[in-house]
Amino acid sequence: MPRKALAYIAGAYEHPLRNAPDTSVAQLHAEVAAGALADAGLSKDDVDGFFCGPDAPGTGPLSLADYMNLNLRHVDTTNTSGSSYLIHVAHAAQAIAAGKCNVALITLAGRPRQEGKSKGALKRQDNPNQPDFEWENPFGIQILGVYGMVAQRHMHRYGTTARQMAEVKVAASHHAQFNPHALLRDPVAVDDVVNSPLVADPLHRLDCCVVTDGGGALIVTRPEIAKSLKRPLVKVVGCGEAPMGQAGGYFEITDTAAQRSGATAYAQAGVTAKDIKYVSLYDSFTITAMLQIEDLGFCEKGTVGRFVEDGNLISGQGRLPFNTDGGGLCNNHPVNRGGMTKALEAVRQVRGEAHPSVQVPNCDLALANAIGGQLGVRHASSTLILERE
């Protein structure tokens, strides 16, 4: 039985730059918007809804909307860090269903590589007015250190090994070699990962994502508009979003909010993990992707180490092809917010437009998931399920 379309993704575009010394942030936003509109066969005059995060320079959406000369009747600036952009797709679908807009533009762009904003190994400098600040900041909490603790905890509880975590990087690098725009295109082996410098025990340098300039954009439309365009039809059939905090200290740092966002998306789409042909997973670190694999139901909790062995994540070889663009580990992690690129590659796969060497055969159902914020502290997960019509 055909699944109901909440909306359609009609346009998708990823900026080719990974290092942008001569392009402003506003220009990057405008360029990805123009690219996504061209991909859809629409113009900026068709856009009446704009969705962005805090990477948009200026006053919320106002400065960029003015810069791009958009005539809008709906805006949304939901911010859950890297998971925001999948939530934007869901919120765009809701706004379209409510009659608030017909063509929604979602953009992400920035220049962290040029601006020296590689923040994983730095002490987190949050707003001192945040309720958590006074409890965490004195201890010099940093993203890299906390993810190392999450990985260490998973090893302690389940016997996961550094070599198993390295398999995630190996799969991403295998895919990245076919992506001409990927920042890191050389395939690596497990030994390369575990012999790279240890940066936050048990995480090695090659367990960590890249830092890139650039960005991406999506166009979400009403069904009748999508069907009038000469593009493959990509339906949004399931959406889920969920935040997760520390619950007063009574929480497990190897659990993620993907348990709830995934369950919501599966229920809305009427599918299970067994139906999914391809997954795009947020891979800020190898352990991040592994926890999502478990919490989205692709394997039992605690068994992901064995699940990812022997190339099981490699397209054409394993049973769960993932991040066929190279992911955040090898391809692109613009603005240190990787959710947008997860949706972009999922759209390519469902359209059949991924590189032939990594295209999943008959990829009619794909899942994209993003983690925003920080595991082990507080974060939000967003899940999209896309289907080819």
Image: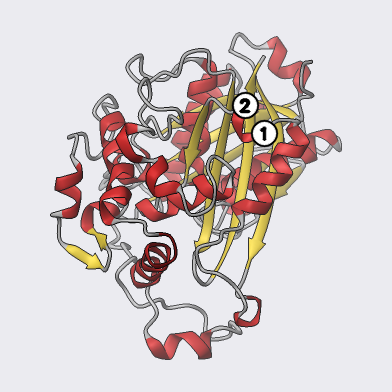
| Residue occupied by mark 1 | 272
Q: Residue at x 22, y 57 (%)?
A: 205
SS for dot 1? loop
Residue furthest out toward the right: 98
Q: Quadrant of residue 189?
A: top left
- Provide residue 325's location: percent of width, then percent of height: 37, 31
Q: Classify 256 as above or below 275.
A: below
- Provide residue 388's location: percent of width, then percent of height: 62, 17
Which is more toward the observer, 81 or 100? Answer: 81
Residue 246: which numbered mark, if any? Answer: none
Q: Residue at x 39, y 88 (%)?
A: 139
The quarter of the rendered structure image containing the C terminus is top right
Looking at the image, residue 87 sits to the left or right of residue 38; the answer is: right
The quarter of the rendered structure image containing the N terminus is top right
Q: Residue at x 62, y 48 (%)?
A: 382
Residue 275: which numbered mark, if any? Answer: 2
Looking at the image, residue 69 sits to the left or right of residue 355; the answer is: right
Residues packed near mark 1 inside 10 Å, few (<14), some (14 to 19) or many (20 plus): some
Q: Quadrant of residue 357?
A: top left
The three-letter code of the residue at mark 2 reads: Asp
Residues packed near mark 2 inside 10 Å, few (<14), some (14 to 19) or many (20 plus): few
Q: Tell me if I can see residue 253 in this picture.
A: yes
User: Alpha carbon of mark 1 to alpha carbon of mark 2: how far?
Assistant: 6 Å
Which is more toward the observer, 111 or 246? Answer: 246
Which is more toward the observer, 45 or 359? Answer: 359
Q: Classify 69 as above or below 2.
A: below
The three-letter code of the residue at mark 1 reads: Thr
Q: Residue at x 23, y 52 (%)?
A: 206
> Are the residues flagged by discs 1 and 2 in contact, CB closer than 8 Å?
yes
SS for dot 2? helix
- Provide residue 165's location: percent of width, then percent of height: 32, 51
